[in-house]
Amino acid sequence: MPIADKMVKMVESASMIRKMFEEGARLREKLGPDNVFDFSLGNPDVPPPPAVKQVLLELINNENTSHGYMSNPGYPHVRKALADYLNKEFKVGLTQDLIVMTVGAAGALNDTLRALLNPGEDILVPAPYFVGYNQYAFVAGANLKTAPTLPDFHLDLEGIKASITKNTRVMLINSPNNPTGVVYTKEELGSLGILLEEASQKFGKRIYLISDEPYRKIVYGVEVPSVFDAYPHTIMLTSYSKELSLAGERIGYLAVHPKAEDAAMIAGAAGVTNTMMYVNAPALFQQVVGQLQGVTVDIDIYKNRRDMFCEGLFAAGYEFAVPEGAFYLFPKSPIENDIKFVGILKEQNILAVPGTGFGGPGHFRLSYAVPEKIIKGSFEGFKKAIDCIR
Ligand code: PLP
């Protein structure tokens, strides 16, 4: 093998995702874009708010705009703007030195995990979970272990307690959740905080909470509670990929709770791990987002799609909980084998992702980051797919 042995499995799973991507493109080419119902990707299609273009143009036309290297964690004035915004939102006392600008949420996860974990230590994540976590754990040389969730995909606190061992260094949560759309409540986060403190005491080792929040602003009539209130030993990280529809611009950040054990050291280390992979977050887009705190895409567009999709799928006979956030549905597969059912959907030119890939077998994921006409046009195929196995 010309490539490293440890890479073989990772490359295989990456090429599976690429194949799915290519399959969508192939079908669109063959059948026409309106006849392929591709719900496989979480790639935001809602346009960025007009303020993004406006700030970008101002920056491009301003000769003082910086395009050079900066201190590794990012431009100080941008981190200060973020700290001010987060302090207003969460009343947490953040300072700019506890914030690191990153290459999207993926960059923030990579930085934080590599800063915190010794090789061979465990990251515990409630399943189902975002598939990228497998890769970030791999890069950190850590093991990704899963904890169960309740039937409604909320946190199973007893299950988490039973899954923590002396090898657990990080609990990783994601709310609003990809793939389930669940938003954790203040109460369950509070209980998780107590549980993590007890487990840290029991094993004589600080367990850190990482909260991955790229969908924080994409919610429908609910608030996303602050994780900083739940547990001080927390690193919150996010990006502008979804809330400003800037996924390809690769801009995000991480923020370490000021009361976290060794907070300054963790933020410092995350700034250094940053330099090992990408040196720094994109300069221009740091300066863009520094001016756009609190601005989001039009969330109503996603809400209308969610409502339309839920109505159509319920009418066709699918079972699932209406998601409170993000832009995914995670219905039960009408047959046990979700991979087989995704194959049946494909016969109707509907592309979905099997839940098995997310550690949630017996389900499948649908992304509604697609135009409404694609959602509407798919209902007949969804009905045929469920009818043909009844
Ligand atoms: N975390 C979750 C839960 C995601 O769904 C994604 C992307 O889809 C990421 C992290 C990575 O986000 P980014 O594109 O900002 O790196």
Image (spheres, rainbow, N blue to C red):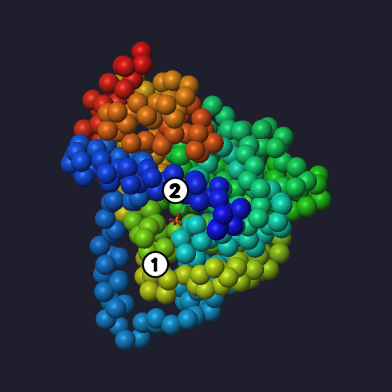
Whether disc 1's CB lies below 8 Å from ligand 1 is answered no
Residue 309, disc: none
> In terms of sequence position, does the residue under pointer 1 or pointer 2 come before the other?
2
For the residues labelled 1 and 2, the Cα–Cα distance comes to 32 Å
SS at mark 1? helix
Position of 84 relative to 309 (above/below): below
Label number found at residue 15: 2
- Please name the residue shown 47% across and 49% down the image: 14
Q: Nearer the viewer, residue 381 or 204?
A: 381
Instruction: Indicate left or right for 253 with 268 as reference.
Output: left
Q: Position of residue 78 (x, y in %)?
A: 46, 73
Above/below status of 284 relative to 232: below
Task: Name the spot of residue 128 as percent of width and height, x first.
Answer: 53, 37
Q: Residue furthest top?
A: 390
Q: Name the quarter where the N terminus is drawn.
A: bottom right
Which x, y percent locates residue 271? Answer: 59, 70
What kind of element bears circle 2? Answer: helix
Instruction: Name the amino acid, label 1.
Output: Val
Q: Is residue 261 left or right of residue 185?
A: right
Q: Residue at x 25, y 40 (%)?
A: 27
Q: Nearer the viewer, residue 29 or 223?
A: 29
Residue 103 image offset from top left, x and y in percent: 47, 64
Q: Nearer the viewer, mark 1 or mark 2?
A: 2
Quadrant of the snapshot with the C terminus: top left
Characterize the local packing of mark 2: few (<14), some (14-19) or many (20 or more) Cα atoms within 10 angstroms. Answer: few
**Residue annotated with mark 1:** 289
Q: In terms of depth relative to the viewer, which is nearer, 378 or 60?
A: 378
